[in-house]
Each structure stands twice: as C-alpha cells, then as structure tokens.
Amino acid sequence: MLDRNSHNDAVDPVSELLLGMRLRGASYGQLRLAPPFGVRFPAGSEARFHFIAAGTLLLRAADGTLTPLACGDAVLLPRGDEHALVSAAGVPLRGLDSYETTRLCSDVCAIRECAPDTCRTKDTLVFTGRMEFELETLHPLIGLMPAVMSVGALLGRQPEIMPLLEAMEREMAQERAGSAGILARLADVVAATIVRGWVECGCGDATGWIEALRDPRLGRVIAALHRDPGRAWTVAEMASAMGSSRSVFAKRFVDATGTTPQRYVLALRMRLAEQWFRRDKLPIDTAARRLGFSSQAAFTRAFKRVIGYPPGRSRLTPDAGRPAATR
C-alpha cells in the first residue's frame, strides 16, 4: 500500500491547492448600449467579468488606464475593482444601478439603452457577471493577480478557448430560448480558463508566494497549512515538516512570503472564516471551533484585528435585493 505521507510529499503544492479553485457566478447581465455611453461599475467583493459580443469600447480602470476591447474580447477583474465601460475617452459616467433592468431569468437581467431605430445594428452588446472565487484557503492568489486579466493573452497558447468565445457571441446575437443560462455557464468557464492560463504561465510578476509553493520543502509546509488550517500549528511542527531547524525554517518562510509563519496561519484562518460567513452564512461560534479557537470571544478579537471589522459584518450582503445586473 502506498504510504500517504510519501504520496503527499510527491504532490506539487501549486497543483494541489489549485484543485480547490472554483469560480461561481453570482449574477449576470446583458447590456445593449448605443454610443455615447459610460457605465460605472462600483468596487465589490466579487470578481467582475465582461464579454464583448458586438461593437467596441474602452475599459477605464480605477487609475484612469484605458484598455480597448472589441467583439470577441473577454476580461476578468479578479478583485472587483471600480472601473467603467465607455464608448470613448471623456464620456460622462453613469452608475450601473441607475439603469432600468428587465429580468430574463433568475440570475440574468438585461439593460437596453438604445434608440429603437439603432438597436441590433449599431449598439454595443456586453455580457457581464459578478463571480465569486471559491478558493477554499487559496486566498493569497487573488491578491497576486493583475487588476485586469484578458483572454487575449491566452489565445496563442490555448486556441481551444476560441470555440467558447464564438459560442458566447452566437448566443448573444441569436437570443435563443435558454440563451441567458447557457451564457452564464460559458462565462464561468471562460473566466476560470483566464485564471488557469495566468497560473500556468508562472503567475506574471507574482513570484514570491508562488515560488515559495514551488520550493519542494517549503511548499510542502504551506500546502499542509492550507489542508489543515484549524490545527494548533507550532513553529517546531512546521520546521519538522520542512525537515529543518526552527530558525532556518522561520527565516526561509519570512524571506519567501513576507510574513512570519504564525501571522500567515492566522491570516489564513481569518480569510477562510470570512468566506464561510459571506458565502455560507456560517455561525460565528461554528467557525471559531473549526479553526481551533477556545472561545468565540478570542476568535472575534482575532478576526477584527486581521480583517478590520467584526465577523458579523461579513454575514451581511449590502447588495442583496438589487437586480442581478446592477450589482
């Protein structure tokens, strides 16, 4: 029988942790807009995805950077930063939630802002979505991602993504029965493919944490922390898992991750708890027990210190109740 520990030692920590990565669409919208237009998307806790099915536009990032997008382009903003889709530079912006919406199905709403004689001919057509990363404990990856990730960077290396984009374009153009639901599923796959392509290409400039994972000895420790974040880890146990002294392990860990092992584990637990609260509405005392805290009070203090606000706030969804396309 294969020894379980020897098997875990042989697993690539990057691949192991990425097995927990999921992108779940929260809501979607179809935007049909006639120039000139400027749609402002507010900052949010979830990623934002855009697919351009017809026309051209500019994506204006929070810092003012303009990125041209044309028919067939898809972009993912993994941290949900504030941004805008504009027909031209200098066009006044209008908040997304100020548009009148029509519900197409339970998860998809439509916005149509075009004159009757121009709709379907000169308008710009966009499929947009809010998406939640279900990363289990792989939170550091989101912070390392670029603010804007484009499918264009993948086409040369992953031509198999083209049929997905073409299928999205057809569904948007034909508006067949059930097209809204099919578009939502295709968007999830395209967005996840964008993230996977970034990881496979070395994660761009995000070298520190990824390099730490790819260190055969240190990566084994980090993977173990993510597998069992509720364990009462000591530096001695972590050093033993790496096969080194405590001092050598602690220095290597700080050099690679920029933080101490104890702070890393604490941040890992709190970010995982935040996801449980937002996504699953998990009771606070249950999260505290799962993560190895002796009392809810101790957990609450740690959560507020790391996240910046009490755990109860994570259970609130300030955008609940608004139409899906406007969130």
Image: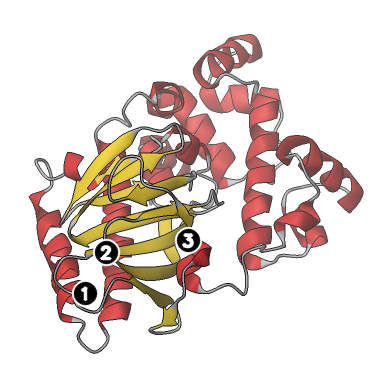
Closer to the chain start, of discs 3 and 1, is: 3
Closer to the chain start, of discs 3 and 2, is: 2
Check if mark 3's residue and mark 1's residue have beta carbons within 8 Å: no
Q: Secondary structure at mark 2?
A: loop
The amino acid type, in three-letter code, at marker 2 is Ala
Return the mark for residue 96.
3
Q: Distance of mark 3 from mark 1, alpha carbons?
A: 19 Å
Residue at the (49%, 43%) spot, across then down: 81
On the question of residue 198 being in view, the answer is yes
Direction from residue 121 to residue 204 in the image, left or right: right
Instruction: Name the image quarter holding residue 59.
Output: top left
Residue at the (25%, 81%) spot, across then down: 179
Measured as percent of width and height from the top left, residue 253 is found at: 56, 19
Measured as percent of width and height from the top left, residue 252 is found at: 53, 14
Residue 295, relative to residue 242: is it above or below?
Answer: below
The amino acid type, in three-letter code, at marker 3 is Leu
Q: Which residue is mark 1?
A: 119
Q: Which residue is mark 2?
A: 34
